[in-house]
Amino acid sequence: MIQRTLSIIKPDATARSLDGAILKMIQEAGLKVVAMKRLHLTAEQAGGFYAVHKERPFYNDLCSFMSSGPVLVSVLEGEDAIARYRTLMGATNPEKAEEGTIRKAYAQNIEANSVHGSDAPETAAFEISYFFSQLEIVG
Ligand code: IDP
Ligand code: MG
């Protein structure tokens, strides 16, 4: 099934100018970038995006980190895009990420782990609409 998923290149990666390298990995994996924007989120905007993690101990740190610099937000489209992008990203903790994944290559630690990807169709729909209108998505 053709799906869309929400990707974020996080502040640790934009700070090191890794956006081009990460997008190259995404495109070489056969995922199509159908929307993109560069944003500097407020802590409140990051908090709304990560509302599902509100009760987690790392929530406040995560909101600070995600608003500490620019992010590159994009919509990726392709066959089974949600699971395929999760595989390409690698494990949340880069120490556990497999060779060939974005987090293995670039993540600094479990928080500053370079990329976000939606984890299910419902979260993808929420996350895409958090950043993009239908007009901004060009398949
Ligand atoms: P995911 O990004 O692999 O889906 P989630 O569990 O959804 O991982 O967590 C969202 C984000 O919160 C992670 O990507 C990471 O930036 C941060 N995070 C997750 N677990 C921890 C932790 O134990 N300590 C600090 N930050 C964490
Ligand atoms: Mg997640």
Image (spheres, grey):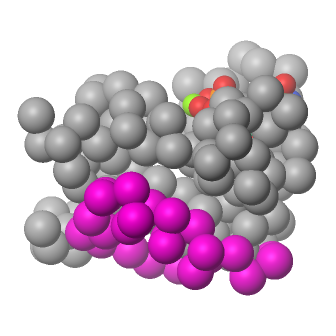
- Left or right of residue 132, residue 51 in this image: right
Residue at (73%, 17%) from the top-left corner?
55
Q: Position of residue 49 (x, y in %)?
A: 54, 44
Whether residue 70 can be seen here: yes
Q: Position of residue 88 (x, y in %)?
A: 51, 44
- Left or right of residue 111, residue 120 in this image: left
- Left or right of residue 93, residue 32 in this image: left
In terms of image quadrants, where is residue 53?
A: top right
The residue range painted magenta reads 15-38
In terms of image quadrants, where is residue 72?
A: bottom right
Whether residue 18 appears in magenta in the rendering, the answer is yes
Q: Position of residue 133 (x, y in %)?
A: 23, 64
Q: Ligand 1, what quadrant? A: top right
Whether residue 112 appears in magenta in the rendering, the answer is no
Residue at (62%, 46%) from the top-left corner?
101
Q: Nearer the viewer, residue 85 or 56?
A: 85
- Left or right of residue 124, residue 110 in this image: right
Q: Position of residue 22 (x, y in %)?
A: 58, 67
Residue at (22%, 74%) from the top-left corner?
136
Q: Quadrant of the N terminus?
A: top left
Whether residue 59 can be seen here: no
* Residue 114 against residue 90 in the figure, above or below: below
Q: Quadrant of the C terminus?
A: bottom left
